[in-house]
Image: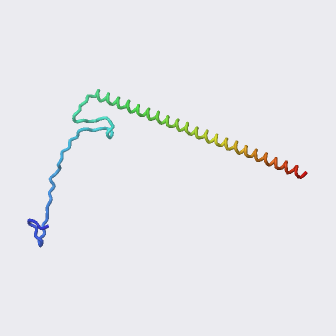
Amino acid sequence: FTGKGNIKSNKSALKMVELGPRIRMKLTKVERLLASGDVMYHAYVKKNPDEAKAIKVKFEQEASLKKRRREEQEDNVRRKKAVQEEKLENKKRKREEREKAAMKELRGASADVESDRSASSGSDSE
């Protein structure tokens, strides 16, 4: 770059100076848990201890309700899985029974055919 003060034969350098922070930050809110806990400090909203206690009780009730619903849902899922497994077992059992009955019927029919053959071959030899 050949511009003001820069000649091809001479070298020039730039010196950078830090100006400091560009933004000012102020603490506004502190929560116990990440985006879901109770507010420990708020710069704009002031609450007396009674209000804070009421909010805490409400939060605990909601947490217990959520826990109870989750347990209830897990019970429902377990029950549905058990019913589904029972249906599959019944289906397998019925299929096996049908297969056994069909095999028994085939064996009975083949035994009848063989007995007919042996009876007819026995009468032929006489």
Residue at the (41%, 33%) spot, across then down: 66
Q: Is residue 17 left or right of residue 56?
A: left
Is 54 situated above or below 84? above
Q: Would you identify the image quadrant in which residue 100 lies?
A: top right
Q: Would you identify the image quadrant in which residue 57 lies?
A: top left
- Tell which of 23 and 49 is nearer to you: 23
Residue at the (70%, 42%) spot, across then down: 101
Q: Where does residue 12 sit, x and y in percent of width and height?
A: 12, 67
Q: Is residue 93 left or right of residue 26?
A: right
User: Seen from this angle, which residue lies furthest left?
Assistant: 4
Q: Is residue 43 left or right of residue 37?
A: left
Q: Where does residue 126 sit, x and y in percent of width and height?
A: 91, 51
- Tell which of 46 and 94 is nearer to you: 94
User: Seen from this angle, which residue lies furthest right?
Assistant: 126
Q: Where does residue 73 sit, x and y in percent of width and height?
A: 46, 35
Is 88 situated above or below 61? below
According to the image, what is the colour scheme of the structure? rainbow
Residue at the (15%, 59%) spot, across then down: 16
Q: Is residue 99 left or right of residue 28?
A: right
Residue at the (85%, 49%) spot, across then down: 120
Q: Where does residue 59 sit, x and y in percent of width and height?
A: 35, 31
- Tell which of 53 and 71 is nearer to you: 71
Is 101 situated above or below 45? below
